Amino acid sequence: MTVTFRLNGEDYRFRDDPMTPLVDILRQEHFLTGTKAVCREGFCGACTVHVDGEAVPSCLKPVGLLHGCEVTTIEGLSSGQEALHPLQAAFEAADAVQCGMCFPGMVMSLSAFMRDNPGACRAEIKSAMVGNICRCTGYERIVDTVVDCLDTHRQTTETAGSMNV
Amino acid sequence: MAQSVERSFTVAGSIDEALAARQQGAAVLAGGTWMMRDPLRGVDLPEAVVTLHRIPALSEVEVDPDHTVIGAAVTHAVLGRALRGLAGFEALVGAAVGAANPGIRRVATVGGNLCTLDFAAADLAPALLVCEAMVEMETFDGPKLIGISDFLRDRPTLLADAILTKVHLRRDLIASAHIRLPLRMAGDYPVAIVSIAVDKDKRFRIAVGSVEAVARRWTALEKALADEPGGFAPNPERAAELAAENNDFHGRDGTEADGWYRRQVLPALVKRGVAALLKTEGQA
Ligand SMILES: Cc1cc2nc3c(=O)[nH]c(=O)nc-3n(C[C@H](O)[C@H](O)[C@H](O)COP(=O)(O)OP(=O)(O)OC[C@H]3O[C@@H](n4cnc5c(N)ncnc54)[C@H](O)[C@@H]3O)c2cc1C
Ligand code: FES
Ligand code: FES
C-alpha cells in the first residue's frame, strides 16, 4: 500500500506495510533519531511528534492512518542551523536538560501545548506533561522553564500590543 | 521495522464500505492505541483492517437540547471539549479528560475504548453506564440499538458481526461525577473507577469500572440509597457507609492491584463522588 504525507515540510511516499509504526519509519528510513522509541506503549512520550499540529505518540501511529497528514518531528521544529524554537532556546538557557532522552518528546508535547494555552498556569503545565516521563526526574526545572517562557511570551505580546496602540 | 507484509488496509468512506470490509474479515482500526500494542503482547496485528476515521458522521458530536449523539471515531480529547460545561455530563467529561495521558486522549476513540474486550479499566464505560447510554451498531443484518449495560456484557458476541457506530445520550441528569483511583498521580490504569449521577427525579445512578472484568451498575447501592427514609439526602459519609454494607463486587487480581484492594477502596470513592456531586449542584 502507498501512503503519502508531508514529513517536516516535504512530500513523502511510503510503500510497505501500512501498520508500520510511524516511529520506525522516522528512525530507520529517515534517520530522524530525535524521536525515541522507548516504551512503545504510549506511556513515556519520548516518541511524541506533531500530526496536523497535535502532539501524539508515534509508536502507536500506524502509517496507514497518516495519508494526507502533516507530520513534524523535533528535527522539523528547528534544524539547528536556524533559530531554535523559543522553548528549545529556553531549555538550553536554563540548563534544564540532563541526559536528554525525554527532551525531544517534552519539546513536542509542550510546544503544542504552549501554542494552544498561552495563559496556562503551573498546574495546567504539569497536566500537559503527564504523558512525558523524565527518567532523570528533572520535572520542576522543566516546569519552571515553561512558566518563564510563557511569561516572556506574554510580556512580548503585551509590549507589542501597547506599541500598536 | 515491519517486513513487507501483504496486509489489506481499507480506509472506509462510508459505514457500508466499513461493514463490507468487516464482512470480508477485516478488524476495525480506530486510533490504534490498543491494537498497535498487540505485537508487544505476542499477538500478531490483524491481516486485514478497516479504518473509520474518514467517515464524517462517526467523527462528530451532536449536542441537541435533549439528545446527544457521539460518533464512534470521536477521540477522548474532542469528546471532553464538546461536552464541557453541560450540566449532567460532568462524569463523561471527567472520564474523557482524565483517562490515559494527553497524547493518547488525542488519538484514542470512544469506539475503541468500548470495544476493547480485554480491557477492564475503560473510563468511558462507567461514565456511559450512569448516562444510561444507548449504543448504535451496524450489523451484517442492519442497524441495532442496545443499552450500554447489555452491550458491555454481550460485546464479545455482538462485535463478531458488527461495528459500533454511535452512542446516544438523553439529557436527564442534573449532575454527575467521575472518580478514578490510579496508583500514581497519572499515566497508569485506574485501580477502580466510580461514576455517580443524580437524575431529574433525584434518583442516584452509580457504576463501577476496573474492579471486575466488565464495568457494571452498582444496583445494590442504588437501591440502598433510594430506600433511605425520606430518600437519600446527599451525604458523603452516609453514602460511604451504605457502599461498605452493599459491596457486592468480586475484585479482579491484576498487575496494578489485587482484587481485594480494588473492592476495598470503593466506599472511599463513593464518598468522594457524592462530595463532588454536592459541589457541582452547589455551583448550578
Ligand atoms: C498509555 C496508555 C494509557 C491508557 N490509560 C487508560 C486509562 O486510564 N483509561 C482508559 O479508559 N483507557 C486507557 N487506555 C486505553 C485506551 O483508552 C484505549 O487504548 C483506547 O480507548 C482504544 O481506542 P482506539 O481508538 O485507539 O482503539 P484501537 O486500538 O484502534 O482498537 C481497539 C479495539 O477496539 C476495536 N474497535 C475500535 N473501534 C471499534 C468500533 N467502532 N466498532 C467495533 N470495534 C471497534 C478494534 O477492532 C480493537 O479490537 C490507555 C492506553 C494507553 C496506550
Ligand atoms: S515510545 Fe511511544 S510513548 Fe513511549
Ligand atoms: S533528561 Fe534524562 S530522561 Fe529526562
Image (cartoon, grey):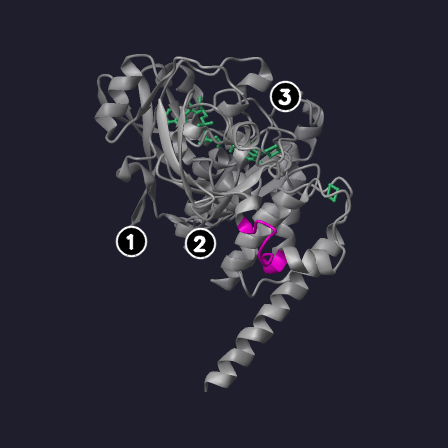
Q: Residue at x 58, y 62 (%)?
A: A120
Looking at the picture, which amino acid does disc 2 mark?
Arg
Looking at the picture, which amino acid does disc 3 mark?
Arg
Which label was assigned to residue B246? none
Q: Is mark 2 within 8 Å of ligand 1?
A: no
Query: Which chain does the residue under circle 2 lie in?
Result: B
Looking at the picture, which amino acid does disc 1 mark?
Pro
Mark 1 lies on residue: B65
What percent of the width, then of the height, locates residue B146? 32, 27
Between B225 and A45, the one lying in front of the other is A45
Where is residue B56, by image quadrant? Answer: top left
Q: Which residues are magenta?
A: A77-87
- Label 2, label 3: how many angstroms apart (C-alpha)? 32 Å
Mark 2 lies on residue: B84
In the image, B53: left or right of A147? left
Mark 3 lies on residue: B252
Q: Which of pointers 2 and 1 indicates the residue nearer the eye?
A: 2
Between B222 and B24, the one lying in front of the other is B24
